[in-house]
Amino acid sequence: MSSHNSYLELTWTDEVTGIKGYVVIDTLSRGVAGGGLRMRDGVTLDEVRDLAQAMTLKEAVVYSPGDRYIPLGGAKGGIDCDPYDPRSREVLGRFGRAMKPLIEALFATGEDFGVRQDVMDEVFAEEGIRSSAESALALVDDGADAAYERLKVAFSRSVDGIGLGELVGGYGVAETALAALEFRGCDIRSSTAVIQGFGSMGGATARYLAAAGVRVVGISDREGFVYNPRGLDVEQLLATRDVFGVIDRSALGADDEISAGDDWIGTEADVLVPAAMSYVITSDNVDRVRASVICEAANVATLPEAEAELRERGVTIVPDFVANVGTNAWWWWVAFADIEPNAESSFDKIRGVLRPLTRELLERARRDGISSRAAATLISEEKRALVAEHYPTSVKSAAVAR
Ligand SMILES: NC(=O)c1ccc[n+]([C@@H]2O[C@H](COP(=O)([O-])OP(=O)(O)OC[C@H]3O[C@@H](n4cnc5c(N)ncnc54)[C@H](O)[C@@H]3O)[C@@H](O)[C@H]2O)c1
């Protein structure tokens, strides 16, 4: 994504299994960097670096000068292990033990692909880590303990059977998709969507698109693609998925169809939401895309050549570091007391920030004849420069738009 050097890159080898893990700190701000920890068979240092760079942009892009939360730097962690591997929990524990000094000093982390926050909390607690975000909590004005309590309250909330912490990210994705549809002049209630992935991000995106009146016609998980042109019963599917976001096939509706997992990309729908792995829209499969809006819930979902072709075809792309910023921003808005630790305040803030931000970046892209990613990168860099005026020594130059 960019040519600048990371602040820190670290490779860990599990002493028991030989499994590798990585942490990349792309930038620091006030001595701290934020970014999730993913677990995936095949994750590499290069992938973690790409994701850490996107985190630098993601941290700054939602900044508003009135907020108590000042953007952190960007970071990411990755463990090269299948989350279904029976050893995954103990590997996460040993990774946490090894990274404890980093987590407590400067790497504020949280759930990502293949890692659930409740599991991370449990495993890290066994290693004596109070919060995966400890280093950021130390920056909060009224103290780390108060911030920790606010996060605890926020994470204890649930909405219709799903924890608030698992919903805020996908709620944000849905809001950016709705803003993009409106920007294109589409009628929300006659629009359709297809989502790849049905975990934290995909599941909540599906819920809140459906709640807004969008017909969700297809959802894929790691077992395949579930399709119904008349619309899937999202709440019913949410109720039957397992902890890894896999739908129980025995609970499908009578006229729901099942096919191969990669069918999601070529299915007719207005909105396509990649919400699983990275690098899924490539020059090899971009011809199959029929959607007019792509909303990147997954980080680094679209490769640059594919993105250029989509732009040529007039497809609107909401880039990852805006579409999926909801979870990250919400953590900090709660911790720094910019919002109340409840669903109403959380959803109000996310909607209030992401709708206008999406409109702003799409308008800027159109006005200046640049890609939406370039427009969003400029917005993020301008905001980071604003932060740098107040904290002059803490900010390294941010990533460059690709
Ligand atoms: N969870 C967050 O807070 C968060 C925040 C920002 C970005 N993201 C990004 O969103 C993406 C999804 O993260 P998540 O936390 O929802 O993950 P998750 O582990 O909760 O869910 C992943 C989903 O992808 C599905 N999946 C796995 N392999 C697949 C395959 N080959 N084809 C289709 N589906 C497959 C799984 O079955 C599951 O439904 C990741 O790229 C992550 O980096 C997550």
Image: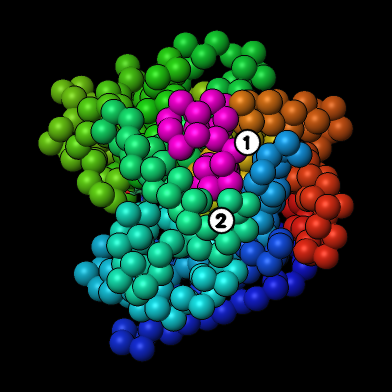
Q: Residues within 10 Å of mark 1 (few under 14, many from 20)?
A: many
> Residue 135 falls in which quadrant of the image?
bottom right
The residue tagged 2 is 143
Q: Residue furthest left?
A: 250
| 211 to 56, vertically: above or below | above
Q: Are marks 1 and 2 in contact (CB under 8 Å)?
A: no
Give the residue displayed 68% in from the left and 51% down from the top: 71
Q: Amino acid at mark 2?
A: Gly
Give the residue displayed 53% in from the left and 48% down from the top: 335
Percent of width and height locating residue 119: 31, 59
| 25 to 284, vertically: above or below | below
Indicate which label's residue lies in the foreground, 1 or 2.
2
- The yes-or-no answer for disc 1 within 8 Å of ligand 1 is no
| 361 to 384, vertically: above or below | above
- Say left or right for 107 vs 83: right
The residue tagged 1 is 318
Task: Evaluate whether residue 3 shows in this view.
Answer: yes
Q: Residue furthest bottom?
A: 15
Percent of width and height locating residue 258: 25, 35
Label drawn at residue 144: none
SS category of the residue bearing label 2: loop
- Check residue 349 for magenta coloring: yes
Q: Which residues are magenta?
A: 329-351
> Residue 365 falls in which quadrant of the image?
top right
Give the residue displayed 64% in from the left and 64% down from the top: 32
Q: Amino acid at mark 1?
A: Val
Quarter of the N terminus within the rendering: bottom right
